Image (cartoon, rainbow, N blue to C red):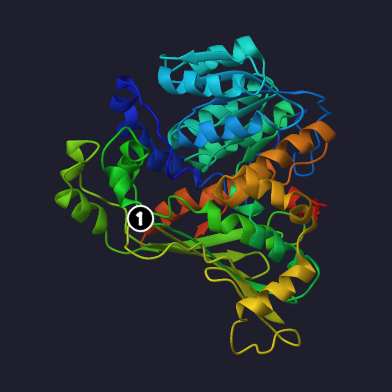
Amino acid sequence: MNSNDKVTISASGRRNFLKTLGGVGAALGATAGIVNAQGAPARAAGAKYMGDFAAPKLDKVKVAIIGVGARGSGHISQLAVIEGVQVVGICDLNEGRAKGSEKNVKGKGHSPKVYFGDENAWQKMLAETKPDAVFIATPWELHGPQAVAAMKAGAHAFVEIPIALTIEEMWDIVNTSEATGRHCMLMENVNYGREELLYLNMVRQGVIGELLHGEAAYIHELRGQMDGGNSTGSWRTLHYAKRNGNLYPCHGLGPVAQYMNLARGEDNFRRLVSFSSPAKGRKLWAEKSTNLTKPEFKTLDYQCGDMNTAIIKTHLGRTVMVQWDETSPRPYSRHNLIQGTKGTLKGFPNGMAIEGMTKSYHEWTSSEEFNAIAEKYEHPLFKRMGELSKKMGGHGGMDFLMLFRIIECLRKGEPLDQNVYEGCYWSAVAPLSEKSIKEDGMPQDFPDFTRGGWKTTKPLGVVA
């Protein structure tokens, strides 16, 4: 999760920012009628399908990172202690942050080249350091272009959420990945949480029967990011002002999509509808705040509804509710609910109701009953790495476990836990929800980023 990232946007970047956001809707309008579930563009000659792709083994993984704010600095610090990693490059607009991460990883035995000050310095870093893997932790509008450039430079790309802003950019990522034979993975850390892994294991073992419905969310009150300092709020706030939709769908959706094997052999995303509540909270916060990052936040006309709800329908007719709210004063939740013919598993708070297993399916389990069942079905990856991950930290250890698995897969030459198509499907909820809202809730088809390949892609296994 990159909710606390601190970033610097150059003066020219700020001038062009609103123009960039204006292009989001234009790109959707230009591509939605051509690139849809009924007619994906043909795969280029010589390109390869990346669904089950395994890259050649890397004994040593040369790593570079673009963006070392609160999110990126944590990534590079953790990567620096994983066996088989060589940190070769660090880039950030801010000299202090770049040199701070350099000092950190030097203390862990690395000697990276450091780049800062120029908004295009990351391009020089790619050319000079020739990394095997590039980690991208920059503002949202840079994710797509930087991921494409990293792959074209010969590196695997690992991208913070979302993978890109527009359907057009997502197709560019897919086509580049297929043409270059390089991974591009959305770094959905929540898929590596203890409960998410537990539920994946239970679902794979058929504990709750045939899957019917899921619920996913990112409900996290973050109005305070608008206050003071050069923080994430300095650039995210502009998205809330100019866009209206589910702008951050992946944290809740990623795990539910993998429970359901969406885009992996069994089922896939088909279409969605989306509605937003009125937009009130951001303006009210700005009006009463005395410490805004930018004074102009007081006069922005905030378009993004405080709560967005999207409903996804899959090819098999299953449903997924996805909600997003970073504004309302309410407790944090990702929902994380998966419902089947024999029972239901949920999060926030955790609970189970399973026919023939729990004491009742009319009430959620007590913490004692939940823990007893969890001990039986604990995911083997968590058994192997859970304690170390919690010690290393990063959202309770899920960050470290995600980074560990990325490096492990690259070194073993195994498919990643999340492929490029999944990252695009999950991220596509944002632009599709925007378009649905503009059309008063009309259904929007998901592009088939796999071009039919999802039908033969292997489900994510319970990795030991």
Residue type at mark 1: give it: Lys
Number of labelled discs? Answer: 1
- Rendering coords of residue 88 (x, y %): 64, 17
Residue found at the far top of this picture: 128
Against 413, residue 214 (above or below) is below
Residue at which label 1 appears? 438
- Residue 242 visible to the viewer: no
Q: Is residue 282 left or right of residue 383?
A: left
Q: Position of residue 223 (x, y in %)?
A: 30, 51
Query: Where residue 344 appears, x then y in whole percent?
Result: 64, 77
- Residue 345 seen by the camera: yes
Q: Is residue 437 above or below residue 168?
A: below
99 relative position to 183: left or right: left
Q: Is residue 251 left or right of residue 298?
A: right
User: Is 15 in front, or is 377?
Assistant: 377
Q: Residue at x 73, y 46 (%)?
A: 417
Q: Around disc 1, counting alpha carbons within 10 Å, would you say few (fewer than 14), some (14 to 19), or many (20 or more)?
A: some
Local secondary structure at mark 1 = helix
Q: Residue at x 57, y 58 (%)?
A: 253
